């Protein structure tokens, strides 16, 4: 066994070089033998380990060189060389026509005329009806309780066996401004149906990654003040519309004393919901500590205001599946947007972002 | 040739391909069977004079067979269409099966009753709205969850929220915050005093919500004149914010919150309340504040 290993090591020491030499000698004629093409497992793993090691060494060298260069530049007073920015989906978004611009007159006119303008202009206070699908699950009731605490002026009605269209009528009579239907699948809340009233659009979201309040470490308990709303990243027209729809669930006048903030953060078409209580504090930051060598710190203590968050309330993500014009009517309604699965996923093509 | 007893004997004791034996009994799978049970009287093969009702596309037909046609299997069963009306159908059955054995006629009528009942039920069900179960391929589910994770990591939600809140703070959206450091707010005070001297407060259309990437509506510029640092329930707690009058008028709900807001709710949290530092507050009575509870002014 030991002999074999020795022999293999010797082989590898020679062969490894061999491989490299071959590549150098006849780069054009002979194909580069990849580590993955070696059939012998031990040999293959050894070659691969060596490759990896080499790569790692190179990478470290590069990083060191970069750091040294930037340090030098700083010392000399010049600008440090540009930092390399990794490519992300957010960086490489294609230019989208539907992105809202801040000076779009048409958008403002559209906003005035859309279904939520009554609520958003504070002409009517939002009143939300929460219900479920016909069969409620184990996590459903807990989730609904937490929703009730998050959204002020929300009421829960049991579903019974009423048809959804009848429920919409009933809610219209009672002057609700929106309906939320929590749909359950396999004993977990699975989908959220947001219906604006009267004749508001119907948004169907898929719900995932639900974390209830009791499962969050160090959670806080929300008060009953009206929360602040933060809607991030709803840039396209469709996103804007969905953002306004979400906005119309909450009262437009937040009570800042409560220091409650509800966030809907949109990232790559996933809407993340968070509910926090915040506090502003002052943090002392000592400047001039970048130079570790100088022991005498410059003594400048800069005070910065920071915000600290304590999470309370549930945490979940939504993904828009379809947006339908008018109240719930899957057969006869007009769909503004439906999620279609394309075979080739173009990463920079996002709809809500 | 056609001897019912012999046929029955052979079928029953040897093999009938229509017979289905279940725990509860023997059933007959022959489509022309009236009752569905494997019986001497219900077997369509072992009775040369027999009748049934069969259903085709929602219409009921009365099928009859007689011994005269027993040698012509092609023309064995005679078919009569029954009307949808139950009473009329009964009459027609009576008419056609007038001289037939009463037991058979009785069984046929029972079958007709049952079939009409389930026809009504089918029609009712089809009109009802039913939830359609749609399946999602597992690949997609996995893909979505993977993408969600990556999006979550890219989002860095907490940082973004904190930044947003600080922005709002710097813009002056918050009229009063209970625990705020004295130095910073003094700095702001000085800044604001200068601004005050220059211009009156501007009241602009107020919308508190700011969407992350761009702002559609302007926000109200509120001045932070005074802050209360100490316990809310003690005196000197009115916020004098000149720019806030409009705000107060439009927030009847806020008043309630003022009254009932108990500071001691956040006992268990990490928030630090700086109780010691009290700032002397100039108070101007506001008309709207009449309802508010004030102790010892």
Image: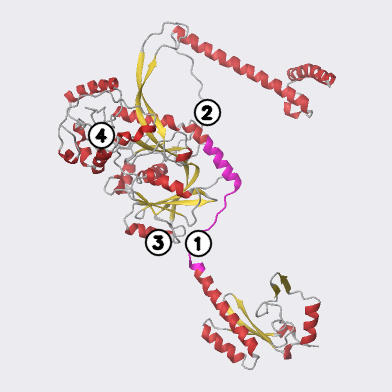
The residue tagged with tag 2: helix, strand or loop?
A: loop
* Mark number, residue B220: 4
**Which numbered disc flags the more N-terminal residue, 1 or 4?**
1
Compare residues A119 and A96 and report the one nearer the observer. A119
Give the residue at x 53% y 83%: B86
* Mark number, residue B130: 1
Query: Does residue A119 appear left or right of residue A316 in this picture?
Result: left
The residue tagged with tag 4: helix, strand or loop?
A: loop
Q: Which residues are magenta?
A: B125-149
In this view, the residue farthest toward the bottom is B99
Label 2: chain?
A
Mark yes or no: residue B217 visible.
yes
Residue A252 falls within the magenta-colored stretch: no
Label 3: chain?
A
Q: Are marks 4 and 2 on the same chain?
A: no
Give the residue at x 52% y 38%: B148
Relative height, residue A115 to residue A31 (above, below): below
How far apart are the two marked residues, 1 and 2, measured between alpha carbons? 47 Å
- Between label 3 and label 2, give the one nearer the viewer: 3
Q: Are marks 3 and 1 on the same chain?
A: no
Marks 1 and 2 in Cβ contact (< 8 Å)? no
Quadrant of the image for the N terminus of chain A? top right
Give the residue at x 48% y 30%: A91
Q: State the predominant SS element of the stretch in magenta.
A: helix
Label 1: chain?
B
The residue that label 2 is drawn on is: A87
The residue that label 3 is drawn on is: A166
How far apart are the two marked residues, 3 and 2, measured between alpha carbons? 50 Å
Q: Residues within 10 Å of mark 2 (few under 14, many from 20)?
A: few
**Which numbered disc flags the more N-terminal residue, 3 or 2?**
2
Residue A50 spot, x, y in % from top left: 71, 20
């Amino acid at each position: 066994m030991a002999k074999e290993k020795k022999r293999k090591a010797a082989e590898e020491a020679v062969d490894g070089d061999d491989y490299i030499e071959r590549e150098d000698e006849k780069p054009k004629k002979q194909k580069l033998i990849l580590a993955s093409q070696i059939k012998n497992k031990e040999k293959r793993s050894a070659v691969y380990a060596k490759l990896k090691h080499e790569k790692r060494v190179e990478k470290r060298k590069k990083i060191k060189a970069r750091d040294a260069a930037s340090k030098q530049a700083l010392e000399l007073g010049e600008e440090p060389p540009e930092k390399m920015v990794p490519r992300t989906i957010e960086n490489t978004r294609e230019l989208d026509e539907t992105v809202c611009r801040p000076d779009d007159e048409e958008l403002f006119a559209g906003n005035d005329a859309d279904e939520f303008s009554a609520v958003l202009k504070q002409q009517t206070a939002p009143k939300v009806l929460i219900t479920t699908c016909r069969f409620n699950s184990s996590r459903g009731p807990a989730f609904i309780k937490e929703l009730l605490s998050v959204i002020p002026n929300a009421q829960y009605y049991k579903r019974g066996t009423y048809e959804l269209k009848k429920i919409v009528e009933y809610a219209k009579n009672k002057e609700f401004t929106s309906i939320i239907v929590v749909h359950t699948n396999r004993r977990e809340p699975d989908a959220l149906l947001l219906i604006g009233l009267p004749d508001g659009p119907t948004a169907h979201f898929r719900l995932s990654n639900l974390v209830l309040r009791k499962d969050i470490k160090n959670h806080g308990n929300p008060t009953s003040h009206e929360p602040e709303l933060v809607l991030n990243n709803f840039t396209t027209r469709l996103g804007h519309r969905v953002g306004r729809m979400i906005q119309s669930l909450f009262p437009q006048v937040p009570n800042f004393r409560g220091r409650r903030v509800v966030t809907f953060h949109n990232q790559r078409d996933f809407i993340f919901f968070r509910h926090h209580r915040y506090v502003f504090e002052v943090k002392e930051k000592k400047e001039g500590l970048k130079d570790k060598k100088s022991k005498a710190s410059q003594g400048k203590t800069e005070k910065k205001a920071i915000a600290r968050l304590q999470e309370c309330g549930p945490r979940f993500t939504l993904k828009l599946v379809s947006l339908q014009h008018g109240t719930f009517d899957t057969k006869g309604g007009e769909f503004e947007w439906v999620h279609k699965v394309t075979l080739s996923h173009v990463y920079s093509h996002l709809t809500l972002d | 040739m056609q001897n019912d007893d012999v046929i029955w004997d052979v079928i029953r004791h040897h093999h009938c391909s229509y017979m289905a034996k279940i725990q509860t009994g023997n059933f007959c799978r022959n489509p022309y069977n009236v009752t569905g049970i494997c019986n001497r009287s219900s077997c369509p093969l072992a009775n040369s004079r027999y009748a049934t009702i069969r259903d085709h596309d929602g219409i009921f037909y009365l099928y009859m067979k007689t011994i005269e046609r027993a040698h012509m299997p092609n023309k064995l069963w005679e078919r009569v269409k029954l009307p949808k009306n139950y009473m009329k159908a009964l009459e027609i059955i009576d008419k056609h099966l007038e001289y037939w054995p009463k037991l058979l006629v009785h069984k046929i009528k029972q079958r007709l009753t049952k079939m009409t009942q389930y026809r009504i039920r089918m029609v009712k069900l089809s009109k009802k709205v039913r939830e359609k179960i749609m399946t999602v391929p597992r690949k997609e589910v996995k893909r979505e969850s993977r993408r969600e994770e990556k999006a979550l990591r890219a989002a860095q939600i907490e940082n973004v929220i904190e930044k947003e809140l600080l922005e709002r703070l710097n813009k002056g959206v918050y009229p009063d915050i209970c625990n705020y450091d004295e130095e910073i707010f003094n700095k702001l005070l000085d800044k604001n005093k200068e601004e005050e001297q220059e211009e009156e407060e501007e009241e602009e259309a107020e919308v508190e919500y700011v969407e992350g990437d761009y702002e559609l509506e302007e926000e109200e510029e509120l001045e932070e004149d005074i802050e209360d640092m100490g316990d809310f329930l003690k005196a000197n707690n009115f916020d004098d914010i000149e720019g806030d009058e409009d705000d107060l008028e439009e927030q009847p709900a806020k008043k309630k919150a003022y009254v009932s807001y108990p500071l001691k709710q956040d006992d268990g949290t990490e928030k630090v309340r700086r109780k010691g530092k009290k700032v002397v507050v100039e108070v101007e009575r506001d008309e709207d504040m009449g309802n508010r509870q004030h102790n010892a002014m």
